[in-house]
Image: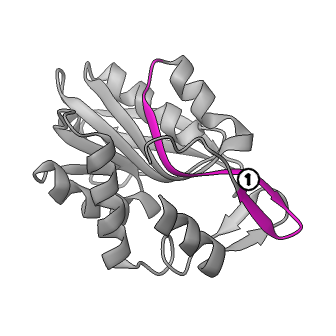
Amino acid sequence: MDRLKEKIRTEGTAIGKDIVKVDGFLNHQIDVKFLHEIGEEFARRFEGVQVDRILTVESSGIAIASCTAPYFDYPPVVFAKKAAPNTMVEGFYEEEARSFTKGTVSRLRVAKQFLRSGENVLILDDFLAYGEASLALVEMVRKAGAQVAGIGIVIEKGFQGGSDKLRARGCRVESLAVIEKIEDGEITFGGGDAGE
């Protein structure tokens, strides 16, 4: 998605060799109009795919999923919580996910009532690096007896191998921008975003 690449180049910042800061439009301040363009692009890439529910992780994925839902006729948006609230008293699915950017391990939880057997679930997230969060969501969907309709990623760091792990699990992955390397403050995009 050329417009996304341009926003990353002009509004993003490369930090070291593996971090891209895009908090001006994606994960701190939200450019809502642009996120609707992202949602429309996900709808184009997953055209013809039945989507009964969209699943993401709090908090950065919520805006992306919410802006994408209208293009799939408003399926419910469910987000995995990183901490178990007191209100989550009934059963839930739980998986661990390591964040290499933050250096933490989270226990992701989704209440069982929000993932249903037989449904087609589209997983969306802002970044894909090593694939830990997406793999955790895939496991939850499968434990629920639902199917992964696909995985949509706004920005993939292709050099960290997450999409290979997901594809090895039989998942379709659509990344709107794939970064092949970060070097000396420069971001190089690869051809992995084949949906263009």
User: Secondary structure of the magenta portion, mostly?
Assistant: strand
| Residue 184 shown in magenta | yes
Q: Is residue 133 above or below residue 63?
A: above
Give percent across and percent down for residue 51: 19, 37
The answer to which quarter of the image holds residue 160 is top right
Give percent across and percent down for residue 173: 46, 35
Q: Residue at x 18, y 22 (%)?
A: 117
Is there any visible trace of residue 83 in the rendered image? no
Q: Is residue 6 above or below residue 62?
A: below
Horizontally, residue 123 falls left or right of residue 175, namely left
Horizontally, residue 183 falls left or right of residue 83, namely right
Which of 68 and 103 lies nearest the eye of the viewer? 68
Which of 156 and 88 lies nearest the eye of the viewer? 156
Which residue is identified by label 1?
103
Which of 1 and 145 lies nearest the eye of the viewer? 1
Give percent across and percent down for residue 167: 52, 24
Q: Residue at x 83, y 70 (%)?
A: 185
Q: Is residue 103 above or below residue 90?
A: below
| Residue 177 shown in magenta | yes
Is there any visible trace of residue 90 in the rendered image? yes
Amino acid at dot 1: Gly
Give percent across and percent down for residue 102: 69, 58
Q: How is the image coloured?
A: one colour
The answer to which quarter of the image holds residue 70 is bottom left
Q: Residue at x 36, y 33 (%)?
A: 150
Residue that protrudes farthest toward the left in the picture: 73
Task: Please tell me how crowded label 1 is: few (under 14), some (14-19), or many (20+) other residues with Cα within 10 Å.
Answer: few
Q: Residue at x 34, y 20 (%)?
A: 143
| Range drawn in magenta | 170-188
Q: In terms of secondary structure, where does tag 1 sit?
A: loop
